[in-house]
């Protein structure tokens, strides 16, 4: 009877597969004569192959894709904005002679005249109170028009012609040349 032996080159499995015990040689070590500490070292190559064997035996192919369930079409009603069109938009349609497009922020003096035509492009907050309008007038045209209106409406010049007061209200006006000949007019407002 032969005892299993491990050949350093790994010939044991081949010899056993042929039905012959491996030949004893100086290079062949009987398995039972190995020290116990070397057995875990022998198991390392087998452990390295274990994940591969599990994948092959367990199957590593993904599950076949299934066709999505057919869904019944559902009719949904009109949404809240379905009735809105540019034709019904007052700003888009307009009357052709809009004087001011947009809404002035709360707290802006109601009696302060504005250049016309103009549109609101920016405004501040409760702590930083301003509004910026864009007009198609040139800078000089906007200045002349606003100066005439301010003088006619009772807004007094407070030292500087572009710092105006009326009652407790105070407005500082600044002009800036914008793109394509347009003018930006900034109104900083508050109480005196």
Image (tube, rainbow, N blue to C red):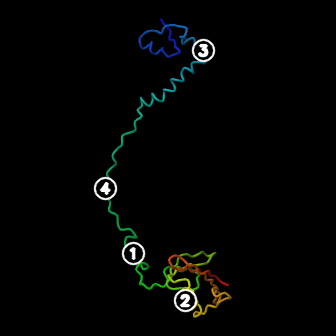
Nearest the viewer among 116 and 125 is 116
Residue matched to label 2: 145
Question: Which quadrant of the structure image shows residue 159?
Answer: bottom right
* Contact check, label 3 and label 4, Cβ < 8 Å: no
Residue 9 on image: x %, y %: 51, 16
Label 3, on which residue?
A: 35
Q: From mark 4 to mark 1, how far is it between C-alphas?
A: 34 Å
Front residue of 12/77: it is: 12
Residue 127 rendering spot, x and y as whole percentages:
64, 75
Tell which circle, 1 or 2, labels the residue nearer the N-terminal end: 1
Residue beneath label 4, please? 72
Instruction: Specify which label sits upstream in the sequence, 4 or 1.
Output: 4
Residue at disc 4, secondary structure: loop
Q: Name the residue under label 1.
A: 86
Query: Dot 1, how many residues are within 10 Å of its Cα: few (below 14), some (14-19), or many (20+)?
Result: few
Is 165 left, or right, of 32 in this rendering? right
| Residues at marks 4 and 2, CA–CA distance in whole angstroms | 65 Å
For marks 3 and 1 on the same chain, the one whose residue lies earlier in the sequence: 3
Label 2 CA crowd tier, 10 Å (few <14, some 14–19, many 20+) = some
Q: Give residue 192's position: percent from left, percent from top.
A: 67, 84
Q: Determine the CA span between mark 1 and mark 2.
A: 32 Å
Spatial CA span between label 2 and label 3 = 107 Å
């Amino acid at each position: 009877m032969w005892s299993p032996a491990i050949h350093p080159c790994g010939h044991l499995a081949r010899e056993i597969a042929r039905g012959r015990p491996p030949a004893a040689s100086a290079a062949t070590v009987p398995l039972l004569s190995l020290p116990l500490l070397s057995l875990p070292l022998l198991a390392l190559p087998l452990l390295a192959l274990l994940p591969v064997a599990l994948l092959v035996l367990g199957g590593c192919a993904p599950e076949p894709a299934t066709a999505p369930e057919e869904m019944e079409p559902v009719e949904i009603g009109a949404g809240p904005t379905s009735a809105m069109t540019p034709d019904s938009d007052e700003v888009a349609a307009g009357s052709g002679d809009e004087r001011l497009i947009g809404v002035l922020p709360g707290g802006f003096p109601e009696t302060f005249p504005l250049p016309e035509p103009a549109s609101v492009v920016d405004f501040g907050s409760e702590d930083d109170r301003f509004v910026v309008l864009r007009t198609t007038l040139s800078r000089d045209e906007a200045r002349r028009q606003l100066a005439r209106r301010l003088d006619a409406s009772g807004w007094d010049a407070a030292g500087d012609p572009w710092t105006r007061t009326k009652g407790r209200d105070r407005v500082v006006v600044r002009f800036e040349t914008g793109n394509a000949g347009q003018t930006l007019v900034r109104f900083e407002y508050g109480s005196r």
